[in-house]
Amino acid sequence: MAASTEDDFEFNTQDYYSLLNVRKEATVEELKASYRRLCMLYHPDKHRDPELKRQAEQLFNQVHQAYEVLSDAHSRAIYDIFGKKGLEVEGWEVVERKRTPAEIREEYERLQREKEERRLQQRTNPKGTISVGVDATDLFDRYDDDFEEMPGGGFPHIEINRMHISQSIEAPLTNTDTAMLSGSLSTHNGSGGGNINVTLRRVTSAKGWGEVEFGAGDTLGPLVGLKVFRNITARCFLTAQCGLQFSPRGLRPSCSLMTARHLDQNTMGYLQWRWGPNSAMITSLVRDTKRSHFTLALQLGVPHSYLMMSYQYKFQDEDQTKVKGSVKTGWFGTVVEYGAERKISRHSVLSATVSIGVPQGVTLKIKLSRASQTYLFPVHLTDQLLPSAVFYATVGPLLAYVAVHRLIIIPYTKAQKEQELELQRKSSATDIAKKKQEAETAVLLMQESVRRIIEAEESKMGLIILNGWYGKFVSDTSQKQEKAKVIDVTVPLQCLVKDSKLILTEASKAGLPGFYDPCVGEEKSLKLLYQFRGVMHQVISADTEPLRIPKQSHRTESES
């Protein structure tokens, strides 16, 4: 939404071509001529009144800035592609000036990425996970005899049997060095523990990095680890990791090696070897496209070996809905999972997964991801394969989501949008008021120049602007609305008359000196009544239509 808001207020940026009243293909000579004329009109030294002098100085600076940008070929190319926002990006001063528009766009995107990276480096980038395990097996697995003997009767016993909390933060030390601090706490059926880790990472080159890890915990003991990442080729990389755990039972070394390769644009292949307490050899294939995500993995190891296959389908909708399913079988048994994921707000994603396994039973896993925080709620329903548990685990979350979505999320999102629209309207009204004040100031500064232009044109029966209106014109049945959406631009138009001619380019007229946009986002036109050679004429022109008066037909009529 932030992006859209930015787009909504794009009209706030001054159109330099419209301000100077030149074509987008204007030559340097045309720019100079227009610049000199406006400088003579707005030069602060021409006004003695302190307030007029101050206002003239502001307009003079705007004209000067527009000329500075458009008269420089490099700045003009950037402005033509990205507008004023593009000129504010740091780093253009070191870019080669002989660039094509495509090269300039590519450079702009690179500089934007670097700016975003610097912004991210200034933050600690916190990440966290909270997991709360719920034992709800009493809902389905209780026996009638035991239930009847329980005091108090018919309420099943539901308890939280495990919790896990982890948090990490990052602190950039230099452009290549980063320190990370992470910690976790876990508890299961009344017993638990925790650990804390400090990691130092250094980017050695554009192809790789390395990190050293130090950890301590109340159950496993101190830990020292080393990890290295390296791009071997453009399509292949390698990760190596080794560690040494100082446990109460002695030293426990571990080592792992993983290599990955791009098989095609959307497919990755992985091969991993792991040695230590859980030694294994793992190979996997991952294919990720715009519409689907597929994973196939095989692990051979101690104590577990398994084969796993998962598939995820991505709907191309606004809420980024995904449905997924997976099958995993090994020495531990077989597990089938299916579920769905959906974006519920700008930064939040909600997912629900049903896990059915032998001998694990049925478990419902609810996951909420909000920004960099993740909340997990695995609810164990039964140790057996009961159709009722599968049914309620599937239908229950759907009904709950529909109810919450209709009763809470939709009203909340609607209220947020209305609030943002109200802020936009207020900002738009403020901007229009500011532009109106600038236009009125410009008209005030034009009065003397317009008086001299009219005298010169009257002496040779030239071009006199009798009336000029700009804005949205409506039917005769809504005169009140029409007056509220058009502005008088007689003086600014007369000020643009030179040698009995008025020439306006295809740029929006709202950027002309003395003009402003009275109805932002609506279709506008220009209506004017003028006198040439003693004959009156009326012209109506679209906002972005070039205009040249007197027209040839009007010249012929006047001469005849």
Image (cartoon, rainbow, N blue to C red):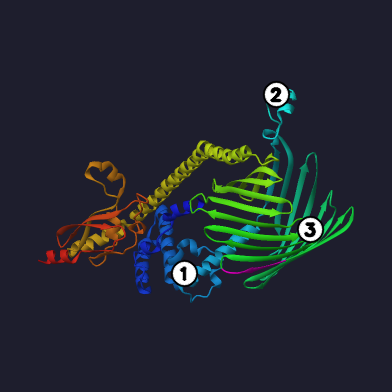
Depth check: 475 or 341 in front? 341
Classify 516 as above or below 411: below
Where residue 70 sits: x, y (%)? Answer: 42, 69
Query: Can see residue 203?
Result: no
Residue that extends furthest to the left in the rendered view of this protein: 560
Residue in the picture at 63% in, 49% down:
337
Q: Which residues are magenta?
A: 258-264
| Element type where label 2 sits in the image | loop
Classify 430 as above or below 93: above
Q: Is residue 237 left or right of residue 433?
A: right
Query: What residue would you read off at disc 3?
Result: 302
Query: What residue would you read off at disc 1?
Result: 75
Residue in the picture at 63% in, 38% down:
389
Q: Amino acid under label 3?
A: Val
Query: Can see residue 140?
Result: yes
Total tally of numbered discs in the picture: 3
Q: Amino acid under label 1?
A: Ser
| Element type where label 1 sits in the image | helix
Which badge, 1 or 2, comes first in the chain's sequence?
1
The mark closer to the camera, 1 or 2, is 2
Q: Residues within 10 Å of mark 1 (few under 14, many from 20)?
A: some
Between marks 3 and 1, how big is the CA–CA gap? Answer: 64 Å
- The quadrant in which the C terminus is found is bottom left
Between marks 1 and 2, how big is the CA–CA gap? Answer: 80 Å
Where residue 113 sits: x, y (%)? Answer: 57, 63
Q: Is residue 423 left or right of residue 536?
A: right
Query: What residue would you read off at disc 2?
Result: 153
Between marks 2 and 3, how big is the CA–CA gap? Answer: 46 Å
